Image: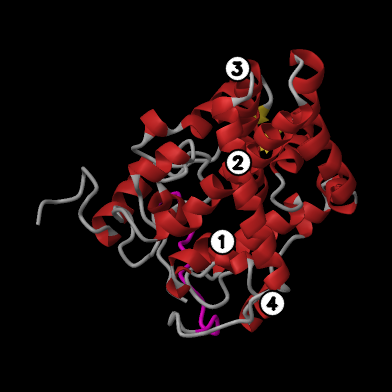
């Protein structure tokens, strides 16, 4: 396994041997029930967008956008930064809010989300990566959820260390009662609030606050797996598929600085230079000021610069001119 360590930073882990070739020429069986389900879900999401534009009350649309933002932050700050990478520590009340909002996001339990993401980092862009980009854009975006897992994904997934997650009572309770909590958090609350408080039609609320919101967040999250592994520059490590791209950063509240993230996954910031589009990083700092977050971890400026100069593609502002 290739390693590179700079001053004050953790080692960079490139794909391990035994994780399989990077060739896309491997087919797994389509799970037609899943494929049909995602097709129907996206059709319903499009109807929800139309309903939001033509029929829904303004307050209903604003409520849906608010939930889209909050659940998105529960994914990128909570599931991703806090639980998958331990980039900071969180007070109990913040962890509770993250668990509830992550349930509302509807992206499987936190336990499964963290396991898949840790495996993605450990075996990035190989057949042991759940959404291996070398199998194509569609596969890395959503196709991996429509097909049976590659045997190496199953094999290597069993070895992912989840001991710290298993010690978190809130996460394990969510895992145990996920389906029950999903009905309440992802459906009843988002749909019910506009109906009760704004007098919204219940079917309009379902289309907008459940389907449109849900499908939008799924595709925002998936864009990091797909777009940010195909398009953009690689300022910190040109040997990685993960890339930095401002458009993806706009879509994902800052998560588009993906080459930085794969080099420094323990950093609470999505990126070093993208602070203007770094909504999630600024929110973590705000939570720290409120006493809800602590022990924010960052890569040292010296380590970041060293990585950019030695391993980057020359697009970093501090990189020497060719």
Residue 272's quadrant in the figure?
top left
Task: Name which residue lies at 27% across and 58% down.
Answer: 312
Spot occupied by residue 105 in the image (x, y as percentages of width and height) = 69, 42
**Disc 4 to disc 2, C-alpha distance:** 36 Å
- Range of the magenta residues? 7-20
Query: Could you tell me which secondary element the residue under label 2 belongs to?
Result: helix
Quadrant in which residue 117 is drawn: bottom right
Q: Is residue 81 visible?
A: no
Marks 2/3: CA–CA distance:
17 Å
Question: In the visual, does 255 lie left or right of 194?
Answer: left
| Front tag of 4 and 3 | 3
**Which numbered disc covers residue 176?**
none
Q: Earlier in the sequence, mark 4 or mark 2?
A: 2
Q: Mark 4 or mark 1: which is in front?
A: 1
- Classify mark 2: residues with Cα within 10 Å, few (<14), some (14-19) or many (20+): some
Residue designated by label 4: 154
Please report whichever mark, 2 or 1, sits nearer to the chain's N-terminal start.
2
Residue 142: mark: 1
Quick check: is 155 in the magenta stretch?
no
Which residue position holds label 2?
47
Front residue (pair 255, 52): 52
Is residue 288 shown left or right of residue 154? left
Q: In which quadrant is the C terminus drawn? A: bottom left
Q: Earlier in the sequence, mark 2 or mark 3?
A: 2
Q: Tell me the SS state at disc 3.
A: helix
Give the structural element (helix, strand or loop) at label 4. helix
Q: Nearer the viewer, mark 2 or mark 1?
A: 2
Identify the residue position indicated by label 3 in the image: 58
Q: Nearer the viewer, residue 318 or 203?
A: 203
Magenta segment's dominant SS is loop
């Amino acid at each position: 396994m290739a390693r590179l360590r700079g001053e004050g930073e953790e080692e960079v882990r490139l794909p391990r041997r035994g994780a399989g070739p990077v060739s896309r020429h491997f087919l797994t069986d389509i799970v037609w029930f899943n494929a049909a389900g995602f097709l129907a879900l996206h059709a319903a999401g499009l109807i929800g967008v139309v309903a939001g534009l033509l029929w829904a009350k303004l307050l209903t649309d604003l409520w849906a956008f608010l939930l889209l933002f909050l659940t998105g932050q529960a994914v990128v700050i909570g599931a991703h930064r806090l639980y998958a990478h331990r980039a900071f520590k969180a007070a109990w009340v913040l962890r509770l809010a993250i668990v509830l909002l992550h349930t509302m996001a509807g992206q499987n339990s936190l336990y499964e989300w963290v396991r898949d993401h840790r495996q993605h980092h450990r075996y990035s862009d190989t057949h042991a990566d759940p959404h291996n980009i070398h199998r194509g854009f569609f596969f890395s975006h959503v196709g991996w959820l429509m097909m049976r897992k590659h045997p190496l994904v199953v094999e290597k997934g069993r070895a992912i260390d989840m001991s710290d997650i298993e010690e978190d009572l809130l996460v394990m309770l969510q895992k145990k009662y996920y389906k029950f909590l999903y009905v309440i958090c992802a459906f009843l609350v988002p749909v019910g609030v506009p109906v009760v408080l704004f007098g919204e039609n219940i079917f309009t609320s379902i289309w907008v606050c459940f389907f449109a919101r849900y499908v939008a967040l799924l595709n925002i999250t998936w864009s990091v797996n797909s777009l940010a592994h195909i398009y953009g520059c690689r300022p910190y490590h040109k040997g990685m598929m993960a890339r930095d791209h401002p458009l993806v950063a706009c879509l994902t509240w800052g998560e588009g600085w993906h080459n930085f993230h794969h080099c420094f996954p323990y950093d609470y910031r999505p990126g070093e230079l993208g602070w203007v589009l770094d909504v999630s990083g600024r929110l973590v700092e705000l939570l720290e000021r409120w006493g809800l977050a602590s022990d924010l971890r960052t890569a040292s400026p010296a380590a970041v610069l060293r990585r950019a100069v030695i391993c980057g593609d020359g697009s970093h502002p501090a990189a020497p001119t060719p």
